[in-house]
C-alpha cells in the first residue's frame, strides 16, 4: 500500500486532542440547568462525530486514490472477528451484531480452538475451528438438522453383536459426550445396528456418523460403516463405506467417520458400525457421539431420551453505503460441504431480483443473476476446472452494469458473462437464500464488498 502523507497523522492526532478537550469541557460543565447541560452534551457529541466522519471520509478517499490495492467498503473477517464498514473504519471496528443480524432459535455445537466441542447459545455466531490444528475456519453455517437417534449419549438405540458395550471414563473424548468401550467377545462380524428409529422416504439422503478411537488397533480402519438392506430398510442392497474413507482426525487419537446413502425405498436406516472379523477376542476400542440425520453430515447434536433439532443459522444485513449499484464487487473465502447452498445472496424481495453464488448453489450452477423472475445469466461450477466441490474457495464476484458484464472468479480462474440487465439489491445474506431455502453446510472465513468493479487481474490475484 502506498505511504500516506505524514501530515495526515498530525491531523488525526490534532482531531484526537480536540475531541479530548471537548469531552473534558463537557464533563466540567457547571452552568445552567441539567436539561441545558444534556443538550450541550448531545450537541457536542454530534459535532465530534460529524467532524470524525468528515475527516475519515477524506482520509479513505485519499487512501483509495493512492493505494495499490482495492479498499473494501465492508469487511467481515470472521476468522479474526474483525468487522468494519463505512466511516469509522480507520478509527475502530464494530461488533458482529452491529453489522450482521445473526439468528438461530436453538443452541448448537462447533469445534473450539482447543479441539473440543463447545456449545454456542441461540442467536450467536458459531465460530468454528479446525479440531486438529486449532486454526480458525470462520463462521459456521448449517441447515436445520435433527439427530434421529433418541439417545446418542447412551447408545441405547443400538444392538450389540459379538461384543459388549460398556460406559467408561478410561479415556476422554473431544466431543465431551459419553464414551463406550467396545470389547470383542467372539470371532466373526462385530457390529452394532440401529434398532428401527425414524422412517425415511425413497430419494432422501441419509447419513450415519460417530466418533471412534482405535486404541492401538489400527486394523479397525479396515472396518466399515454398513447400511443394511432388507425388509423395512431403505436400501435394496447393502452399502459398505470404509471407516478410513471419510475419517476426520480429532485430538487425542480420535476420528469422526461417516457414511451417506440415498434411500432406494421407504424404510429404516439399518445403519451400523461394523468391524467384520478384524481384532482378537478381548480387544477393546472406543465409540462415542453417534448421529443419524437426513441429509449430508453436519456437526454433532447430542441427544439423551429424545431426538434433538438444531435450527439453521441465518446471517443477513441491509445493504447501505457499502453497495454501489453502478458497479461493485464481492470477495468471499468459504468452504461449502453440501451439494447445494448459497455462500452469499444479494437480493431485493427474494429470488425474483437477486444475485446468488454457491459451490454449487443448485445442481452445477455457481452463479445466477435474476431480474423480475427471469434468469439473465449464470455460470456453472464445471466452468472452473481447477476447483473441486467441497474444497476451500476464494471467490470474487464483479458486477459491471454499465458494460453489461459480470465476472466470477474462483481460486484464480475467471468466467465472464453478459447480461442486459442487473437487479438493484437491498439485502445481503450469508449461507442461504432464506432460513428454509438453499441452505449451505460449511464455513465462511471472510466476506468483503467493494464499491468498484474489480478488474480480472485484481480478482485473480486476490483469489490465488
Image (cartoon, helix red, strand yellow):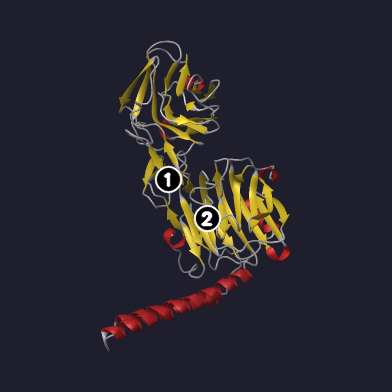
> Does residue 194 appear to the left or right of 5 in the view shown?
left
Residue at the limit of the structure toward the top, as seen here: 187
Residue matched to label 1: 311
Secondary element at tag 2: strand
Q: Position of residue 58 (x, y in %)?
A: 55, 76
The residues tagged by marks 1 and 2 sit, at their Cα atoms, a distance apart of: 17 Å
Q: How many marks?
A: 2
Residue matched to label 2: 429
Quarter of the image where one finds residue 57: bottom right
Secondary element at tag 1: loop
Q: Residue at x 66, y 52 (%)?
A: 409
Q: Position of residue 26 (x, y in %)?
A: 33, 82
Asked whether 48 or 40 is in front, the reply is 40
Residue 464 appears in the rendering: no
Q: Residue at x 42, y 53 (%)?
A: 103
Of mark 1 and mark 2, the one earlier in the sequence is 1
Q: Is residue 165 above or below residue 420?
A: above
Residue 78 appears in the rendering: yes
Amino acid at each position: 500500500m502506498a505511504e500516506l502523507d505524514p501530515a495526515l497523522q498530525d491531523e488525526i492526532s490534532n482531531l484526537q486532542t480536540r475531541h479530548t478537550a471537548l469531552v473534558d469541557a463537557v464533563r466540567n460543565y457547571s452552568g445552567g440547568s441539567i436539561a441545558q447541560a444534556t443538550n450541550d452534551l448531545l450537541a457536542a457529541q454530534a459535532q465530534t462525530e460529524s467532524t470524525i466522519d468528515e475527516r475519515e471520509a477524506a482520509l479513505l478517499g485519499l487512501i483509495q486514490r493512492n493505494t495499490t490495492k482495492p479498499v473494501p467498503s465492508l469487511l467481515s473477517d470472521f476468522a479474526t472477528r474483525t468487522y468494519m464498514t463505512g466511516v469509522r473504519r480507520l478509527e475502530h471496528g464494530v461488533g458482529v451484531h452491529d453489522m450482521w443480524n445473526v439468528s438461530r432459535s436453538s443452541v448448537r455445537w462447533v469445534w473450539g480452538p482447543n479441539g473440543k466441542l463447545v456449545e454456542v447459545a441461540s442467536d450467536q455466531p458459531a465460530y468454528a475451528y479446525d479440531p486438529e490444528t486449532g486454526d480458525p475456519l470462520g463462521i459456521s453455517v448449517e441447515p436445520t438438522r435433527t439427530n434421529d437417534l433418541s439417545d446418542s449419549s447412551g447408545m441405547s438405540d443400538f444392538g450389540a453383536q459379538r461384543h459388549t458395550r460398556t460406559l467408561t471414563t478410561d479415556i476422554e473424548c473431544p466431543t465431551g459426550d459419553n464414551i463406550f468401550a467396545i470389547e470383542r467377545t467372539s470371532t466373526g462380524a462385530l457390529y452394532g445396528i440401529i434398532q428401527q428409529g425414524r422412517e425415511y422416504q425413497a430419494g432422501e439422503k441419509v447419513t450415519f456418523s460417530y466418533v471412534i478411537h482405535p486404541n492401538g488397533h489400527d486394523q479397525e480402519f479396515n472396518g466399515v460403516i454398513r447400511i443394511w438392506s432388507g425388509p423395512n430398510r431403505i436400501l435394496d442392497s447393502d452399502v459398505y463405506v470404509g471407516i478410513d474413507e471419510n475419517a476426520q482426525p480429532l485430538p487425542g487419537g480420535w476420528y469422526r467417520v461417516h457414511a451417506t446413502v440415498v434411500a432406494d425405498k421407504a424404510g429404516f436406516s439399518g445403519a451400523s458400525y461394523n468391524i467384520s472379523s478384524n481384532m482378537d477376542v478381548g480387544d477393546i476400542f472406543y465409540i462415542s457421539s453417534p448421529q443419524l440425520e437426513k441429509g449430508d453430515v453436519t456437526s454433532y447434536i447430542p441427544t439423551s431420551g429424545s431426538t434433538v433439532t438444531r435450527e439453521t443459522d441465518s446471517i443477513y444485513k441491509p445493504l447501505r453505503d457499502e453497495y454501489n449499484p453502478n458497479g461493485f464487487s464481492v470477495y468471499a473465502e468459504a468452504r461449502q460441504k453440501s451439494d447445494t447452498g448459497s455462500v452469499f445472496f444479494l437480493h431485493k424481495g427474494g429470488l425474483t431480483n437477486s444475485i446468488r453464488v454457491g459451490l454449487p448453489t443448485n445442481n452445477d450452477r455457481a452463479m445466477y443473476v435474476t431480474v423480475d423472475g427471469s434468469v439473465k445469466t449464470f455460470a456453472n461450477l464445471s466452468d472452473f476446472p481447477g476447483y473441486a466441490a467441497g474444497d476451500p474457495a476464494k471467490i470474487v464476484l464483479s458486477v459491471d452494469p454499465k458494460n453489461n458484464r459480470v465476472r466470477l472468479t474462483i481460486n484464480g480462474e475467471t468466467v465472464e458473462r453478459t447480461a442486459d440487465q442487473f437487479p438493484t439489491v437491498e439485502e445481503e445474506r450469508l449461507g442461504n437464500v432464506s432460513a428454509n431455502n438453499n441452505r449451505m453446510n460449511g464455513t465462511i472465513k471472510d466476506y468483503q464488498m467493494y464499491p468498484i468493479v474489480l478488474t480480472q487481474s485484481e480478482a485473480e490475484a486476490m483469489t490465488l
